[in-house]
Amino acid sequence: MKQTIKHIAALAVACALTFASASAGVLGIDGEEATSIGIYIKDLADGNVLVEQNSQLALTPASVMKAITTASALSVNGANASFETKVTLRGSKGAAGLWDGDLLINATADPTLESENFKSKLGFCDSIAVALKRRGIRKISGTVIIRQNLKDAGPILQWEVEDIAWPYGAGLFGFNWRDNIATVYPVTGKTKPEVPGLKVTLNKVDGGNDLVRGVYSDRLMAYTRDTGKRTWALKTTVPDPSAVFLAELKSVLSAKGITVGRKALASEAPETALYTHRSPSYAEIMRSLMVRSDNLFAEGILRSLAPADTRKNAIKREKEIWATRGINPRYTIINDGSGLTRANRLSARFIGDVLEWMAKSPMADDYVSFFPRAGKDGTLRGFLAKTPLVGSVALKTGSVSAVQCYAGYKLDADGKPTHVIVVLVNGFFCPRKQVREATENLLLDLFDKK
């Protein structure tokens, strides 16, 4: 009897929403008739679809793409894996504290090296210095070599050029350092930390402050109305994170009394392990990137699906993963792991099917924990904040120009997923606030059973 009543109630809600769709639209936002909207909300217990509108329409997901990236990587690599950066010595030990050879950094595209988001993992340069001193090494006759084997590294060509210079547009490299960003003082051209080779051009404009740097370019153009303010500073991306690291490492080693040469010496000599840095676990990285919507971390997690290979092959593997699980990726377009590019296309149904698969998998608890909670976390802190649904809806948000998306779960009192929720809104004409409030009202109508 309870199950019958549940089905009748669900049917009533679905009918009411279908009627709304035929008249004012499911969301009821201004200009909805000219807006592309995909909605898919499903009860995981009985399989009943409560709301479905254009669920097969391929739309720009923005940062909701991160929910797919983390689902793919978690289901393949597990929660406890991590990136390893191995530091080795090549050559042989000489007399009186001399290492006759080179110091090698074997990078694995770890996006978290010296990241401000994992303060407990800071101190990479100091750890190398300590390891050298323990071996009694005070001089390296060769130099420091960074091995980077990531193909097509750096910013993604499908990203907008105006995004590249800002911290959220930091590209993934074979070696990443300090979130691949630095503080720049445009009036003086100085940076902190030092960014070797970066050329800063200051331009006076009547409008607000702006930064522009092309893909792979070492020229940063800064725009401001106040060109005389020497203390004016902004965060910007760096064109070569390994160069920033090398300058810092040599400075730290010098301060510890360890000198390094400038020329590689021992290309054919055997290698000796010196120190291994392990990143936070994949689960910790994924939780951080989902709550903060970190694009760099998302690109690193995507590339973990095909280490040292191309981005194209990492994406190919991602699609194959879901195809083997019965989720058809044929009408999806994926160019990155973060969703920063406007060229991605996913349907609400595809996202919903991935969310459902994860909710029923052994990784469900870890995966659901990655999502910000309504009214509490990250990008969802203000969403449903003063409603009965606070904390009981977990969603990844996504937003770029005229795009607002949500994907995640309704949770029960124990934090277990009961429903899949996907709302994708593209090309809206109303204020973004109206889209957010309309989505809140939709969820309250469905789940706030007073």
Image (cartoon, grey):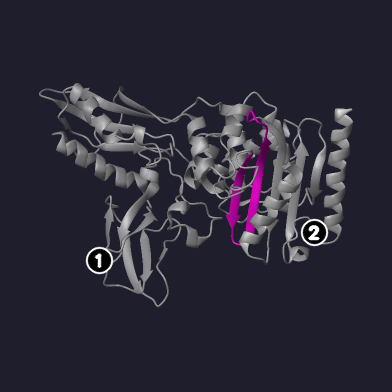
Q: Closer to the N terminus: mark 2 or mark 1?
A: 2
Whether the magenta-drawn stretch holds residue 38 is answered as no
Describe residue 273's horizontal placement relative to residue 417 as left or right.
left
Q: Amino acid at mark 1?
A: Arg
Question: Badge 2 is on which residue?
Answer: 25
Q: Is residue 398 magenta?
A: yes
Q: Are marks 2 and 1 in contact (CB under 8 Å)?
A: no
Q: Amino acid at mark 2?
A: Gly
Q: To which residue does mark 1 refer? A: 230
- Viewed as shown, does residue 337 lie left or right of 405? left
Which residue appears at 43% of the width and 44% of the height? 173
Q: Residues within 10 Å of mark 2 (few under 14, many from 20)?
A: some
| Rendered location of residue 317, percent (x, y) | 63, 36
**Residue in front for this viewpoint, 7 or 141:** 7
The residue shown at (15%, 38%) is 255
147 or 446: nearer the eye?
Answer: 446
Magenta region, residue range: 393-415
Q: Secondary structure at mark 1?
A: loop
Magenta segment main secondary structure: strand
What is the spatial separation of the Cα atoms under label 2 and label 1, in whole angstroms? 53 Å
